[in-house]
Amino acid sequence: MLLRKIESFLRETGMPVTKFGRLAAHDPRLVGDLRNGREPRSGMVERVEHFMNNFGGNVHAA
């Protein structure tokens, strides 16, 4: 479910997967790992969902 939300977010924003991982979870490999079957813990899910829910749309933000 999380991966589906992330994929939608990436399509909507045009953000590169490694940048998303760095900004959302300090892990540039996050999306690739999730695509390969990584199961995130609840804290990671909360952190990533919080990032997506509060993202202002500025792809070039730090």
Image (spheres, grey):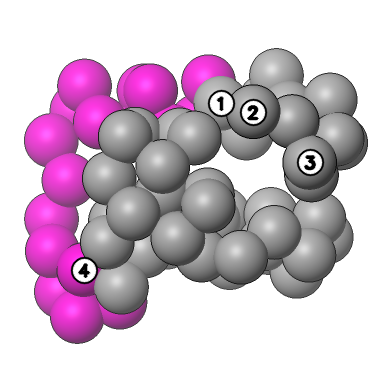
Residue 2: percent from the left, percent from the top?
41, 51
- Point 78% across, 65% down: residue: 14
Q: Earlier in the sequence, mark 4 or mark 3?
A: 4
Mark 3, Cα crowd under 10 Å, few <14 / some 14-19 / many 20+, is few
Kind of residue sitting beneath label 3: His
The residue that label 3 is drawn on is 60
Helix, strand or loop for disc 3: loop
Magenta span: predominant SS is helix
Residue 29: percent from the left, percent from the top?
27, 61
12 above or below 32? above
Q: Nearer the viewer, residue 54 or 4?
A: 54
Q: Is any atom of residue 12 visible in this view?
A: yes
Helix, strand or loop for disc 4: helix
Residue range highlighted in magenta: 33-50
Q: Nearer the viewer, residue 26 or 8?
A: 26
Helix, strand or loop for disc 1: helix
User: Which numbered marker is on residue 33?
Assistant: 4
- Give me the C-alpha separation between circle 2 and circle 4: 23 Å
Total number of numbered labels?
A: 4
The residue that label 2 is drawn on is 62
